[in-house]
Amino acid sequence: MSVGINGFGRIGRSVFRQLIEKGVHVDFISDSNLSIDQAEILANYDSVYGKSKKFIKKVSASSFEISKKKIKFYKTNSLSSIDFNDISIFIDCTPEPNIKLIKDLMKKNKNVRNSLITHHTLDADQFFVYGVNSKKLPAKRTIVSTTSCDGTAISPILKEFLSEGINFVSIIAMHPYLSSQRLLDGGGQESKDSNLSLWRAAPNNLIPKETSIAKVCSEILPAIEGKIEAYQIRVPTNCVSGAFVRIFFDKNIEVDKVHSKIDNFKKSNFVMVNSVDLTSIDFRGEPFSCIIDKRHIVIKDKFLELLIWYDNEYGYASRVVDLVSRLI
């Protein structure tokens, strides 16, 4: 049983690292923007997470080796040119996956059990979020969206409080800058985002930006549709997101009930509860969907405010890898 990864950016590489650390064989990596030499360096060394625990080595113009096993490398933007014969799980980590083509490839390659899309897309057959609908595995031969880092972090929290009668949710997310932004003020490649603030230097600015968090959470949890709004600020850090989640209930919420629900998360393997005086960088590399910070809980009448942290790369990728481990 092996995995194929299309897209070797921040999420693709994080998924790759965690898979090989767990001993899952990766049959191929494909990325149209990288040479094999670039892919080798980026797989083994990372400015945020440091050196990989398991190194890959280029052994030919189109392949790597790790633990005496071969990993094929394709520099292509055409999935049709990739050999899918030896994989059981396909993971697409590209910004704009071609769902129609992936469906066609799954029809031709009956050995592919599932395709996972590391984006929130309604074109997938279903969403899969730990703590929301993770008890039952996706059906075979389906395309599964593992949604977004924000949806993976926030929607399990909201689901836990649905039974208390949610009237409205307001979220303010603080998200690290992304590679699509600029190191210095300036132009460059065309962007689909009309927010000109994103052309300003990412390491020097707090940049307000529209976010899909409300849309994503509403689609994962239809019960909150029309009851949620979200805002995002891109912050000058390179990893770990934070979000203030403000929930307004139909009736007064009991303090003991809030703490009981939060303590229930301690029993899970996807949510961490923190009460130590830490900052965002201290949660770098944490494999949890989110970390609830008990130092910053506000409870008053019908109002609850939580501060949650989440490693928007490693934590999110950990849930993708968890699903792969269960599927194979």
Image (spheres, grey):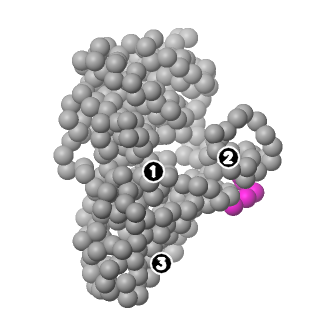
| Residue 15 in view | yes
Name the amino acid type tagged 1: Cys
- The residue lying at 80 percent from left, 47 percent from top is 185
Secondary structure at badge 1 equals: helix
Picture quadrant of residue 99:
top left
- The residue lying at 69 percent from left, 61 percent from top is 206
Q: Name the residue under label 3.
A: 296
- The residues tagged by marks 1 and 3 sit, at their Cα atoms, a distance apart of 21 Å
Secondary structure at badge 2 equals: loop
- The residues tagged by marks 2 and 3 sit, at their Cα atoms, a distance apart of 34 Å
- Asked if the residue at tag 3 contacts the one at tag 2, i.e. Cβ–Cβ closer than 8 Å, the answer is no
Q: Residue furthest bottom?
A: 301
Q: Give the range drawn in magenta.
A: 201-206
Name the amino acid type tagged 3: His
- Asked if the residue at tag 1 contacts the one at tag 2, i.e. Cβ–Cβ closer than 8 Å, the answer is no
| Residue 44 in view | no
Q: Mark 1 points at which residue?
A: 149
